[in-house]
């Protein structure tokens, strides 16, 4: 293959990547407006009666907690033996914003048996994350990770969004990229957290 053909192929690939990113961001801008279908009070009502470790998460719904990686590890230790889903996100991340409707729905549907935790990774300020969560609440807390180090340590990735699933035995599955539907997220919660 000639150099000119290689250059054309590389340019076409770059254009395709940019198109996919643009479509994901476009999906994110339309999807986020539907994310807050339930209020925090409605979520807590639907999740009332959850086992104590999960109820503690629901009491901290849509909060951005301090403590970084040490706090995430302490929370995981307290949840040992339970299925856990950790979502690494940031308020500035279009694909992250696009999946919040799915996380809101699935965390309420599965929140009596699965622990959900967020890691707000590499947001410039905690206030940005809190403002986003006021508009698009979820039924679980997130840990503030301004440096991004906790998110990388937990997800083994510098990208966002990333979702990590742990089954009852602690086996881990990592999903890179956004969940654009609640059905896709629910399927993976069942497959990697509940059935493992």
Image (cartoon, helix red, strand yellow):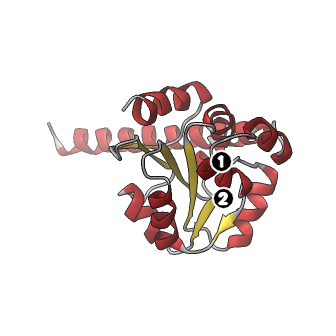
- The residue depicted at 50 percent of the width and 38 percent of the height is 20
Label number found at residue 188: none
Is residue 76 shown left or right of residue 1? right
Identify which residue, 28 or 51, lies in the foreground. Answer: 51
Label number found at residue 97: 1
Counting from the top left corner in percent of width and height, residue 138 is at 71, 47
Label 2 – label 1 distance at C-alpha: 7 Å
Choose top left, top right, bottom left or bottom right for residue 8: top left
For the residue labelled by badge 2, is the local secondary structure a helix, a strand or a loop? Answer: loop
For the residue labelled by badge 1, is the local secondary structure a helix, a strand or a loop? Answer: helix
> Alpha-carbon neighbours of circle 2 within 10 Å: few (<14), some, or many (≥20)?
many
Is residue 150 shown left or right of residue 46? left
Identify which residue, 103 or 55, lies in the foreground. Answer: 55
Label number found at residue 91: 2
> Alpha-carbon neighbours of circle 1 within 10 Å: few (<14), some, or many (≥20)?
many
Query: In the picture shown, does residue 192 fall above or below 62?
Result: above
Label 2 close to label 1 by CB (< 8 Å): yes
- The residue depicted at 62 percent of the width and 48 percent of the height is 54
Q: Mark 1 or mark 2, which is nearer the start of the sequence?
A: 2
Counting from the top left corner in percent of width and height, residue 124 is at 63, 73
Quarter of the rendering occupied by the N terminus: top left
């Amino acid at each position: 293959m000639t150099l000119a053909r290689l250059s054309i192929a590389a340019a076409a690939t770059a254009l395709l990547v940019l198109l996919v990113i643009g479509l994901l961001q476009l999906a994110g801008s339309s999807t986020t407006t539907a994310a807050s279908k339930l209020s925090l009070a409605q979520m807590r009502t639907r999740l009332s009666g959850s086992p104590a470790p999960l109820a503690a998460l629901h009491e901290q719904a849509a909060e951005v907690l301090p403590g970084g990686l040490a706090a995430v590890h302490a929370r995981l230790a307290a949840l040992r033996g339970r299925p856990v889903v950790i979502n690494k996100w940031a308020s500035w991340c279009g694909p992250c914003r696009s999946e919040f409707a799915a996380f809101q729905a699935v965390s309420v549907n599965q929140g009596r048996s699965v622990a959900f935790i967020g890691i707000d990774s590499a947001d410039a300020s905690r206030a940005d994350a809190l403002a986003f969560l006021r508009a698009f609440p979820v039924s679980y807390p997130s840990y503030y990770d301004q440096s991004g180090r906790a998110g990388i340590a937990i997800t083994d990735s510098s990208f966002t969004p990333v979702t990590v699933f742990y089954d009852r035995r602690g086996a881990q599955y990592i999903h890179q990229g956004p969940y654009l539907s609640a059905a896709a997220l629910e399927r993976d919660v069942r497959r990697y957290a509940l059935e493992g």
